[in-house]
Amino acid sequence: MDLEKYRKRFNEYSAFLRFIGAQITVLKEGYAEAELTVKPELLNMAGIVHGGVIFSLGDSTVGAASKSYGHGSVTLEGKMNYIHPISGVGSKVKAVAQSIHAGRQTGVYECRVYDGEGNLAAIGQYTMFMFPERAAE
């Protein structure tokens, strides 16, 4: 699988990533990075990035990492621990996902989310169901 070609396709066809203003920036086998720039629509009432945005960014980044092995996947379970708030419209958010276990039917992935200054803001773990069919390139 041409991972650079797939990364570009993933960004093109992921309507949700485009909606929140994020994109996958790095894709290697079992590994992905994503970035987004905070916009006002992503803040909660306290003026910090909504936890659902952070969770979803992690989920999408893990989705890209899990598909890097060449098979389709969906999330079976995910959890996120929030450590440090992310604030500031215009600031950057970075998610880094990597494989912990890449099985034939399931995979387990960790995703760390960082604020624009490199502080760890959240850490999540996701279990993915792997389809036997090849992912569309």
Image (tube, rainbow, N blue to C red):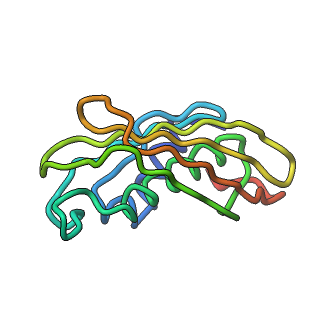
Q: Position of residue 22 (x, y in %)?
A: 33, 51
Quarter in which the N terminus is drawn: top right
Percent x, y for residue 117? 24, 30
- 50 above or below 109? below
Residue 93 or residue 18, whichever sits in front:
93
When the figure is inspected, residue 70 is found, relative to residue 26, above or below; the finding is below
Total marks shown come to 0
At horizontal 16% and vertical 61% (from top left) the residue drawn is 47
Residue at the bottom extreme, as displayed? 45
Residue at image position (54%, 44%) is: 6
Q: Which residue appears at 58% of the width and 31% of the height?
A: 28
Direction from residue 66 to residue 94 in the image, left or right: left
Q: Residue furthest right?
A: 104
Q: Nearer the viewer, residue 84 or 22?
A: 84
The residue that appears at 17% across and 43% down in the rendered structure is: 91
Q: Position of residue 16 (x, y in %)?
A: 40, 66
* Placement of 68 over or under 132, stated as above or below: above
Residue 99, given in percent of the width and then of the height, sits at: 67, 37
